[in-house]
Amino acid sequence: MVKDGAQLYTMEGIAAGLIMLLTTYLVLGSTSVYTPGDTHITDMQLEQVGSDILRVMDTPVRLNNTLIDNSLNRSDLEQMVNTTNGGRFFSTFTNTYLCNPEVVANAVLSGCGDIQVNASVWYLTNSGSLGTYMVPNPNPGLSSVPGPGVRVTHWIHTNYKPGPAASVPGDMKNEPQELLLEVVMWKA
Amino acid sequence: MEGVKTEAQWIVMMGFLVSLGIFFLAIIISQSTLVGQTTAEGVLEFPKNDIQDLKHDILEVEYFNRTLCTNLGGTKCGTVMGNISQEIQQISLYRKSAIASFSFPATCSGSPPQRDVYIHYNNGVTAYDEYEIRIYC
């Protein structure tokens, strides 16, 4: 004699199993995996932060219209580029702004120690061709293979008086001019 | 069907509701990643920082033109302004793959004295022109 009392339990069990399988399928299918190739979000943050830092550094500490050509009117960035003071540039860029927890969002800060920075200045030479020099980096980046990186640039207007410091290339024009500062930031 | 207990129906229903809840949460999470991705791509693609930076520099040039440049003397000032114009064009082209130029009248006129700055920028994806940045000088 076969008993059929448990048939409902069997059906319920099958239904429950189907629901669980369906749920698992939907949950797994609707999450997306953040692969290393999808670096757009961190790239965007890094680029924006770097661009903002350069803009802040190019703001003069004080402005005095009667002293237009006074060195006090020059921004930090302009002074550093005029004197190729790489040490001060990189310490300001990295320590004062990029890795300062009061300035940078935690999302960017979390990998701050890994971020390497390099900078070069582009200018037009006396003869009208394109010239460049690296901003001397006292703590050059790790020699490992660079990870994904971004390039941020900033135009610098410099009045360049009383003339280029001895440390800048000799073919730079000794007059007010526009320079392009290129900063490459990458994760080591 | 006699003798079948039905108290467990609540458990089945709650299990179903919870699974639905997890499903919708997962949809929201996956959407947020997608939105962040496309937003970031949009931000990277549009040269907002380049344009703002160029504009900032050109306005500095305009200020330089009517202050320090005039102190340099007419001929020297003309040379320097020509060079600055060339620098912006050449360096933009070589380093940013962008065509950039600017112009403004040599002198201010009108009352109050003023002049309009014109900026042109085109990096192949985004073309940007600003015709009337009115500077009172």
Image: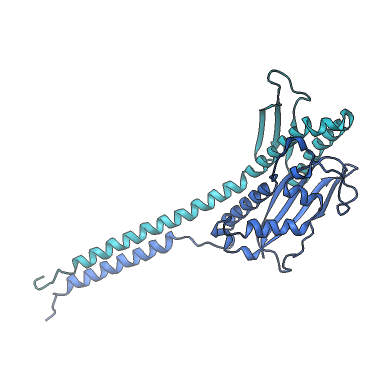
The colour one sees for chain A in the rendered image is: blue
Viewport quadrant of the N terminus of chain A: bottom left
Viewport quadrant of the C terminus of chain A: bottom right
Seen from the viewer's position, the closer of residues B9 and A170 is: A170
- Quadrant assignment, res A110: bottom right
Seen from the viewer's position, the closer of residues A152 and A28 is: A152
Residue A102 point in image, percent of width and height:
57, 57
In the rendered view, would you say A185 is above or below B47? Answer: below
Q: Tell how many labels.
A: 0
Residue A85 point in image, percent of width and height:
79, 56
Q: How are the residues colored?
A: by chain
In the rendered view, would you say A62 is above or below A98? Answer: above
Seen from the viewer's position, the closer of residues A129 and A62 is: A62
From the viewer's perspective, tell me whether residue B95 is left or right of residue B30. right
Residue A146 point in image, percent of width and height:
69, 64
Seen from the viewer's position, the closer of residues B100 and A18 is: B100
Q: Residue at x 63, y 49 (%)?
A: A52
Q: Residue at x 71, y 40 (%)?
A: A63
In the rendered view, would you say A88 is above or below A56? Answer: below
**Residue at the top extreme, as displayed:** B111
Q: Residue at x 73, y 56 (%)?
A: A89
Q: Residue at x 15, y 69 (%)?
A: B7
- Quadrant assignment, res B12: bottom left
Residue A40 point in image, percent of width and height:
59, 55
**Residue at the bottom extreme, as displayed:** A1
The colour one sees for chain B in the rendered image is: cyan
In the rendered view, would you say B22 is above or below A66? Answer: below
